[in-house]
Image (spheres, rainbow, N blue to C red):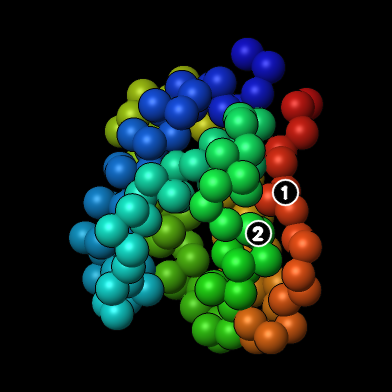
């Protein structure tokens, strides 16, 4: 395995993971709050493309769907929500197991997700603070 993208099963694995995570968060009474005003019909596909790119896969998200700046703006300015963050990370960890991601990669993937969640949701105080031109941060091989 040379990338976490390969560890999750490539594009197909990213889509399975995104579906599993989305089902879990929609079923969670705390995390589902983030989706109560609705979400795009293609949310899961976009999420899968974003995760795939961030984990070392092709830049499909950046080339066809959006930018890191747009993602961070969408998630910025919502204040502290530690319990929601904790539950979203747990849903991700559980989704890794649900989708059969090998155990030896799960800890690293959960760490990545926790850090990415903090960056996307809490690095900037408000959407207007997010600069243009941010790149999707890609996990480097260790």
Residue drawn at point x = 46 percent, y = 28 percent: 11
> Which residue is located at x 63 percent, y 38 percent?
59
Horizontal and vertical percent position of residue 27 = 21, 60
Residue 19, by quadrant, is top left
| Residue 39: % across, % down | 32, 68
Residue 7 coordinates in the image, percent (x, y): 54, 22
Q: Disc 1 on helix, strand or loop?
A: loop
Q: Nearer the viewer, residue 108 or 41?
A: 41
**Crowd tier of the residue under label 1, counting other residues whose Cα lies within 10 Å: few below 14, some 14–19, many 20 or above:** some
Kindly report the distance in space between the C-alpha atoms of the residues bearing marks 1 and 2: 8 Å
Residue at 37% over, 73% down: 34
Name above or below for residue 101 compared with residue 32: above
Q: Is residue 50 above or below residue 100?
A: below
Q: Which residue is mark 2?
A: 68
Dividing the image into 4 quarters, which one contains the N terminus?
A: top right
Residue underneath mark 1: 137
């Amino acid at each position: 395995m040379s990338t976490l993208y390969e560890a999750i099963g490539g594009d197909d694995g990213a889509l399975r993971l995104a579906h599993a995570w989305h089902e879990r968060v929609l079923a969670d009474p705390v995390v589902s709050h983030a989706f109560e005003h609705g979400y795009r019909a293609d949310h899961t596909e976009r999420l899968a493309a974003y995760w795939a790119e961030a984990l070392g896969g092709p830049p499909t998200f950046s080339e066809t769907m959006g930018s890191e700046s747009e993602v961070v703006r969408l998630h910025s300015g919502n204040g502290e929500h530690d319990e929601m963050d904790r539950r979203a990370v747990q849903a991700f960890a559980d989704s890794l197991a649900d989708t059969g991601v090998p155990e030896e990669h799960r800890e690293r993937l959960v760490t990545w997700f926790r850090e990415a969640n903090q960056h996307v949701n809490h690095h900037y105080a408000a959407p207007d603070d997010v600069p243009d031109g941010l790149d999707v941060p890609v996990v480097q091989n260790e």
